[in-house]
Amino acid sequence: MTTTSVPAKKPGGVRVGVQRFGTFLSGMIMPNIPALIAWGIFTAFFIEVGWTPNADLATIVGPFIHYLLPIIIAYTGGTIVYGVRGCVVASIAVMGAIAGSDKLVADFNATLPEGASELGQVHMFIGAMIMAPLAAYTMKWLDSLWDGKIRAGFEMLVNMFSAGIWGFVMAVVGFYPIAWLVNGLMSTLSNAVDFLVSANLLPLTSIIIEPAKVLFLNNAINHGVLTPLGIQQADEQGASILFLLEANPGPGLGLLLAFAIFGLGAARASAPGAAVIQFFGGIHEVYFPYALMKPAVILALIAGGMTGVTTNMLLGGALRAPAAPGSIIAVLLQTANGAYFAVILSVILSAAVTFLIAAVILRASRKRDLEALAATDDAFGAAITQTEAAKGRSSDALSNLRGGAATQAGGGVEPAVMTEREVKSIVFACDAGMGSSAMGASVLRNKIKKAGIEDVSVVNKAIAALDDSADLVITQNQLTDRARRQTPNAIHVSVDNFMNSPRYDEVVELVRDQHKDGA
């Protein structure tokens, strides 16, 4: 059995640490976006100012956001860290944080003079993101202390009581220090946002957010701060402008349109298709290579972002719930009643401003860019590679931008997959087990079906969910080492592009040959 893959680099530094932190937060939030969407639908239809007010159904809204959402976020985070035991203990722990927060709010309101404005409930989204890994990691550590030391016949007793007792302990921890910490943190962050809004300084956040997006540092900002604060604000006011700070597709669209008209070479040729993917598909990462290829255009993105935020501030643009992915379709579906004009105008103006400034930058450097293009025909490919390196992993949307560049450049295909192991189960794995791995699995599944092979399953999973049932695991090359540690006995195949890799044909040929040989 032999495989060949490109060894993954092991970057370090603060940026990579922030990326990993943001990835972990995304892992807890992203799988639960459907629940946030469902909550947004309930609020859109049934609250007092909704499209179809219904006092009975509106009673679902409060418990949904206050209990269900934090608990399933904790459940997801606990699962990532320590499977079923981790998710159960994490869910118990966050319930303590919710109750502790409610107690703090009630005690505070009891001290207020009659007629004073009372403090509203603090929703434990940040509490869930703290308690989940804390509870799951400590449960995992405790289990390691008595692993292999339990007398036969007492395993279930010890496992059940240890998880229950530790869940009780972590709920108490959540009730006191964590609830106090999160309530104080949410109060501080809310006051900071209120100050920025009242001082008309909220557009300045684009100075941080737009460069952070290009460097893949946005997850920590978006899921760690903006989403929890936005949900808190939406619960109190019905909608929040914070959901639009990062999700606005306007700046990315403007940049891609500028490259489509004033760009050169492969960047110009691929920009129109990338614009469609970014604006309607919501995959913002497709415009990051363009910004990295010409860093000066980040100024255009910042200006476009500030324009969009300013427009929404002045006209009351806001969303009821997070727009994920950041597609114009998702944005419009989550737009609050009466805010459609503001939101649509903010997207148009932010795209226009970004386009105009980027066009000036591209035109001003056109002569120099033509000389550089003559010197190397792979400048855009290098920018894509730089983007993938900044992100720490590859992406279907980014890889597709290369088109046939690799073939034109004479790039070779890695040696064929060779193994004596019978392949019955093929798993595509990525960070979250969604998106890119699902698309890759669909492509290979169709190839295997066309080859007339019927008894081979092709599925997609998160790397953390891989187990020994997988015979062959396909990952993006920078994730292969992680997947190999998770399933050391499986065959591992590395690819650059989940959507269109020549290695898929090698895998199909391998499986077909096994069937011919009567495997």
Image: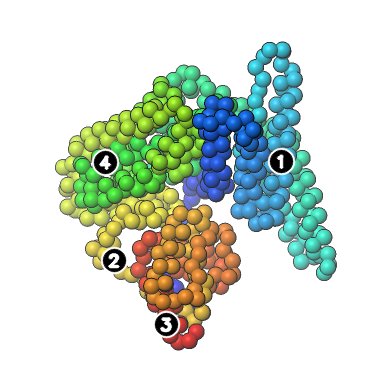
Q: Amino acid at mark 4?
A: Leu
Indicate which disc, 3 or 1, sits on the residue closer to the N terminus. 1
Q: Is residue 12 left or right of residue 468?
A: left
Query: Does 188 appear above or below 495?
Result: above
* Camera-nearest residue between 197 and 479: 197
Label 1 sits on a secondary structure element that is helix
The residues bearing labels 4 and 3 have C-alpha atoms spaced at a distance of 47 Å
Counting from the top left corner in percent of width and height, residue 381 is at 29, 54
* Residue mark closest to the camera, 2 vs 3: 3
The residues bearing labels 2 and 3 have C-alpha atoms spaced at a distance of 26 Å
* Camera-nearest residue between 477 and 287: 287
Look at mark 2 in the image and give the residue it sits on: 411
Name the image quarter holding residue 128. top right
Look at mark 4 in the image and give the residue it sits on: 257
Counting from the top left corner in percent of width and height, residue 519 is at 50, 84
Look at mark 1 in the image and give the residue it sits on: 95
In this view, which residue lies farthest toward the bottom?
Answer: 517
Indicate which disc, 4 or 3, sits on the residue closer to the N terminus. 4
The residues bearing labels 1 and 2 have C-alpha atoms spaced at a distance of 54 Å
The residues bearing labels 2 and 4 have C-alpha atoms spaced at a distance of 29 Å
The residues bearing labels 4 and 1 have C-alpha atoms spaced at a distance of 48 Å
Callout 1 environment at 10 Å: few (<14), some (14 to 19), or many (20+)?
Answer: many
Res. 245 visible in picture: yes
Q: Is residue 254 left or right of residue 175?
A: left
Query: Does 101 appear above or below 260?
Result: above
Q: Are marks 3 and 1 in contact (CB under 8 Å)?
A: no
Label 2 sits on a secondary structure element that is loop
**Which residue is at a point 58% across and 70% down the rendered structure image?**
469
Indicate which disc, 2 or 4, sits on the residue closer to the N terminus. 4
Q: Amino acid at mark 2?
A: Gly
Counting from the top left corner in percent of width and height, residue 51 is at 51, 30
Look at mark 3 in the image and give the residue it sits on: 513
